[in-house]
Amino acid sequence: MSNEARRNNSPMEKERRPATETRRDADGPLEERMNKRTILISGGRRLIFYSFVSEGKRPLSRPEGEPE
Amino acid sequence: MSELRWNPLLGEWVVTATHRQERTFLPPADFCPLCPTRPGGFETEIPAPSYEIVVFENRFPSLQPSPPAPAVEGTDLYHVAPATGVCEVVVYTPDHFSTLAAQPVERIEQLVAVWTDRFRELGALDFVRYVFIFENRGEEIGVTLHHPHGQIYAYPFIPPRIARELEMSAAHRARTGRCLVCDIVAEERRDGRRIVVENEAFVAAVPFFARWPYETHIYARRHIQSLLDLERSEGRALAAILKQTLIAFDRVFERPFPYIMVFHQRPTDEGDHSHYHFHIEFYPPLRTATKLKFLAGSEAGAGTFINDALAEETAAALRACIPKLD
């Protein structure tokens, strides 16, 4: 890669690559059992709680211990 | 203050982030910012009395979605750009005294799903060209928080080591018609002496060209470019081989084993990176139970590593420490 090309490898708009999802097995992707909830914390930063439903259990409405 | 400064000698960006001098440094366990916030207790970064896996934007980021303007003006020689990007912290468990190795395979599989989700979400941002997942473990590496966690940097450019791997992979594909890492995996499996452990979807080996005595790579056996390409069974296999490798690290010198763990995946720009091959690399700094390998003159100044050990011997030592999983 030339120096010019390396420098041009810099912050700029890019074309959006279509999302691909290939995690497909007989028992389904783990993401389907993944709960995700986002809140804002100090400084307006994003915080995401990830929780998972165990095999054979019903989904929880809210991960254990999370604030209302 | 943070900005990107161009190094014309190496053709690389350097991130300047002076505010990181203020970051929390080895706090006592009672004041760990990654622990849950207990009722009436110290208010941590995570406002909940418990959690499973948490991801949040770093309080002291090197890269930010809306960074401040650079503190200096660039020139024709010295280019300057805003430090645009995202820096996230991934907290593996609420247990302050645990480790990634101590997590059940099921929890590590969940972590693989979280890493995959972050790769997808951050990679879709229009200012992100490379999503870099990593973990620094141990004070020897410079860790400032002991709570089990990793980090993700979403860069606005393709970092130089990845760019070099992409170049070499593309050249190998052009010359042979084959994937470079697929060929490395085949060579390591044919030889066998440097294999640490393998399962149906992944191979862990101290590579022929290891720079660190216990450097270990985990290669996907199938030609895939990122976590997004994993089948469910491969996610489980990755979790299992990660746990086995990490336990072997801690057993080899019968002490907590410091390491840098990095995920090498395809860039998230518009390019065709079908020649690239997903793998994970570990750089442990120990060369004996009590001695560290430092990046000194040859490594830091010339970029040429001197490895004090034979990959065939360190792989055998790690292989002897691999646990069987239930």
Image (cartoon, coloured by chain):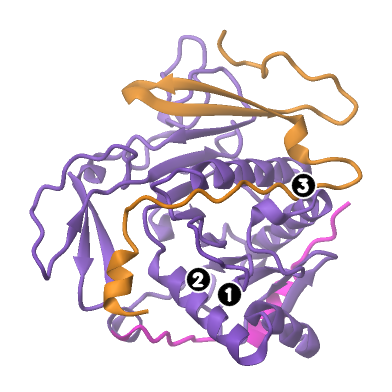
What's the magenta region? B302-326
Q: Are marks 2 and 3 in contact (CB under 8 Å)?
A: no
Q: Which of the two labelled residues, at mark 2 and mark 1, occupies the earlier sequence position?
A: 1
Residue B302 visible to the viewer: yes
Q: Magenta residues: mostly which secondary structure?
A: loop
The alpha-carbon separation of the residues under discs 2 and 3 comes to 26 Å
Q: Which of the two labelled residues, at mark 2 and mark 3, occupies the earlier sequence position?
A: 3
Answer whether residue B62 is magenta in the image: no
- Name which quarter of the figure residue A55 lies in: top right
Residue type, numbered disc 1: Tyr
Q: Colour of chain B?
A: purple
The alpha-carbon separation of the residues under discs 1 and 3 comes to 23 Å
Q: For the residue labelled by badge 2, is the local secondary structure a helix, a strand or a loop? A: loop
Mark 3: few, some, or many residues within 10 Å (few <14, many ≥20)? many
x, y percentage for residue B296?
A: 32, 80
Q: Are marks 2 and 1 in contact (CB under 8 Å)?
A: yes
x, y percentage for residue A43?
A: 32, 24
Residue type, numbered disc 2: Leu
Q: Quadrant of the N terminus of chain B?
A: top left
- Name which quarter of the figure residue B325 lies in: bottom right
Q: Which mark is residue B286?
A: 2
Q: For the residue labelled by badge 3, is the local secondary structure a helix, a strand or a loop? A: helix
